Amino acid sequence: MTSPAQTAANRENARKSTGPRTRAGKDRASRNAFRHGLAVDLSADPRWGLQVEEVARAIAGPRAGEGPALAAARLVAEAQLHLVRIRSIRAGLLSELDRLLREMEKGGAEPSTLTLVKAGLDAGLNNKEIHAMVAATRRSQPAARVSGLIGQLSRLDRYERRAIARRKSLVRELDAP
């Protein structure tokens, strides 16, 4: 049972966390999902629309006409290709991260900085923690870029988890009798 004091505290906290209130804040928040293009509907994108259709037809099989089975297969195909797109972006970010770390190594970066960055990655630290470690030892442009890439990778993880869950749910619906 929640006490009256806890209920009052919950209500007070809810009033503080209602999101942006100004027009400028609401406009800025409305663009959050479009920062990297992962919120764009794949079937609306001409580069991915044909692939969605091809994968959907492969999933639905040759006997499926334009019925509900093909519509469900399109949703599964879109979820799968969304996952492919996320993983492609991740591969690019990891490649850039590897390039920057090699550049830091070749450029005579302090071994302690490079060691900290690699240790932070291995330990799964978040962007702020790795950035703090790097900033404490060295304030270089590549190190700051590495920290930014780590932040992008951690945000991308959230999109990947959601895409996997969506695909799993859609496959279950497709398999249901």
Image (cartoon, rainbow, N blue to C red):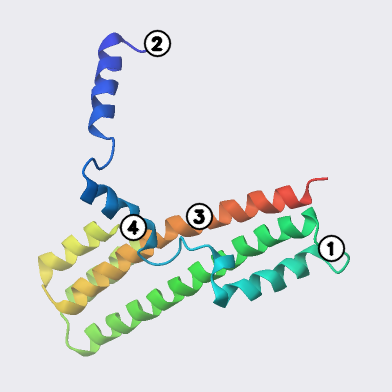
Q: Secondary structure at mark 4?
A: loop
Residue located beneath label 4 in the image: 31
Residue located beneath label 3 in the image: 161
| Residue under the image location 77 percent in, 60 percent down | 70
Task: Pick whichever of labels 4 and 3 is earlier in the sequence.
Answer: 4
- Which quarter of the picture shows residue 95? bottom left
How crowded pointer 1 is (Cα within 10 Å; few <14, some 14-19, many 20+) is rated as few
The label shown at residue 65 is: 1
Q: Is residue 63 left or right of residue 133?
A: right
Which amino acid is tagged 3? Arg
Residue closest to the eye, 125 or 154: 154
Q: Position of residue 170 (x, y in %)?
A: 67, 52
| Residue under the image location 44 percent in, 73 percent down | 89
Asked whether the beta carbons under mark 3 and mark 2 sit within 8 Å of each other, the answer is no
Q: CA distance from mark 4 to mark 2?
A: 40 Å
Task: Pick whichever of labels 3 and 2 is earlier in the sequence.
Answer: 2
